Image (cartoon, rainbow, N blue to C red):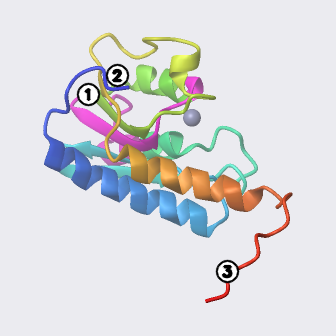
Amino acid sequence: MPKQPPIDNATDERYMRMALDEAHRALERDEVPIGAVIVCKGHVIGRGHNLTEALTDVTAHAEMQAITAAAATLGGKYLVDCTLYVTVEPCLMCAGALAWSQISRIVYGADDPKRGYHTQCDAPFHPKTQVTGGVLADECAQLMTSFFKRKRPARAPKQQQQPS
Ligand code: ZN
């Protein structure tokens, strides 16, 4: 659900592909495939993917990893003039952390109708933060759908293959 048109489609898609690369890293570790990168003035200053299983930590979301990495790179806790790219709409916890960071812009891919911040709050971010949703949404959503499909035990018997 985009709140405003993307500032630059090609740039947004380029960085979202990097976030998708991070999501694939999570997938390789059998983690829920969500990835994030933080960009400041054309430089990637932080990246991360979901690590909640590896770290046995419910707060180890992709955005939290990226925020920590970006602040370490900058040597400061505020992410003014930075943009976060994340493959799935942030949850309320990450939205809160992003609000604390005062990040300038948030770009996300797929909506999360179950756990996205929209389900609980319309504007949890810093008042100056711009939000763009729906960038490469299908690819981002597809990764999640296939992950959860694989996780779910097959209930129905497999369909018989058509003779060729
Ligand atoms: Zn989160």
Extent of the magenta region? 70-93
Nearest the viewer among 143 and 14 is 143
Q: Whereabouts is ligand 1, in terms of quadrant?
A: top right
Q: Which residue is mark 3?
A: 162
Which residue is depicted at the point 17% across and 48% down?
11
User: Pointer 1: what residue?
Assistant: 80
Q: How many marks?
A: 3
* Residue at position x 52%, y 39% in the image: 64
Kind of residue sitting beneath label 3: Gln
Q: Is residue 112 above or below residue 43?
A: above
The residue under the point 34% across, 28% down is 78
Q: Is mark 2 within 8 Å of ligand 1?
A: no
Between circles 3 and 1, the one closer to the viewer is: 3
Q: Residues within 10 Å of mark 2 (few under 14, many from 20)?
A: some
For badge 1, the amino acid type reads: Val
Residue 149 location (% of width, % of height): 69, 56
Q: Is mark 1 within 8 Å of ligand 1?
A: no
Question: Of marks 3 and 1, which one's residue comes earlier in the chain?
Answer: 1
- Relative depth, front residue between 107 and 3: 3
Cα distance in 3D space between marks 3 and 1:
57 Å
Q: Is residue 88 above or below residue 123?
A: below
